Image (spheres, rainbow, N blue to C red):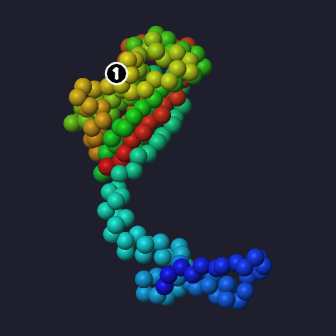
Amino acid sequence: MAQETIVNQGTYQPTRADMEKIDSNFTELYSTTSGSTSDIATNTADIATNTGDIATINTGTIVYSHRQRVTVAEINAGASLLAAITGKSYRLISCKAIAYGGAAGAVTTVDILGTQSASGVKLVAYAQAALTQSAVLTDGDSNSAVLADGASYAACDAATAITIGKTGSDVTTATGVDVILQYTIE
């Protein structure tokens, strides 16, 4: 059945025929493929399983975003940004860092860390000199080193976390670093 259109003749009062068209439109909307009426919440699964085009277009790659304020004490000790997920791996899409509460001092780099081929790697290393209060550092810019040949954007090992740490002395002066990650789970 095609959608039934209601033509209002300027009275702004729906007629019985208009109401029947509205009812027919909703009956069609709430119908399953078998023609019976049911609850839309129940039919959501039918839509997901009966429309192959949607499954073909959406191949399962969803980009997630995670923002976390990490104190200097947490950076100095090493802290988890994304907990390990059994059987799944993270792939970094992009990462930003913003020092808050002052500029970061003493440290050489503040690092976003992952595991690739069973070895710990620095996915992004943010230079201390650029971690000034409120400055937005983005992976790959002049003060944010990434791994050679795009390896920072390769999938990390399954069941491993993404963490934050430091190279050199402990971070001082700043209150912490605001980290914004975009990533996929594979």
**Location of residue 128 with respect to 65 vertically, above or below:** above
Q: How many marks?
A: 1
**Location of residue 68 with respect to 98 vertically, above or below:** below
Residue 94 in picture, x, y percent from top left: 39, 34
Asked where in the image residue 113 lies, by quadrant, the reply is: top left
> Which residue corresponds to the image point at 34% horizontal and 21% vertical from the top-left?
145
Residue 106 in picture, x, y percent from top left: 46, 10
> Which residue corresponds to the image point at 44% horizontal and 36% vertical from the top-left?
181
Residue 119 in picture, x, y percent from top left: 24, 32
For the question of whether residue 57 can be seen, the reply is yes
Determine which residue is flagged by label 1.
Answer: 145
**Location of residue 170 with respect to 116 vertically, above or below:** above
Residue 1 in picture, x, y percent from top left: 48, 85
Q: Is residue 182 left or right of residue 101?
A: left
> Which residue corresponds to the image point at 52% horizontal and 35% vertical from the top-left?
68
**Location of residue 121 with respect to 4 vertically, above or below:** above
For the question of whether residue 159 can be seen, the reply is no
Q: Answer few, some or many: residues within 10 Å of disc 1's Cα (few below 14, many 20 plus, some between 14 and 19).
A: some
At mark 1, the secondary structure is strand
Asked where in the image residue 127 lies, by quadrant, the reply is: top left
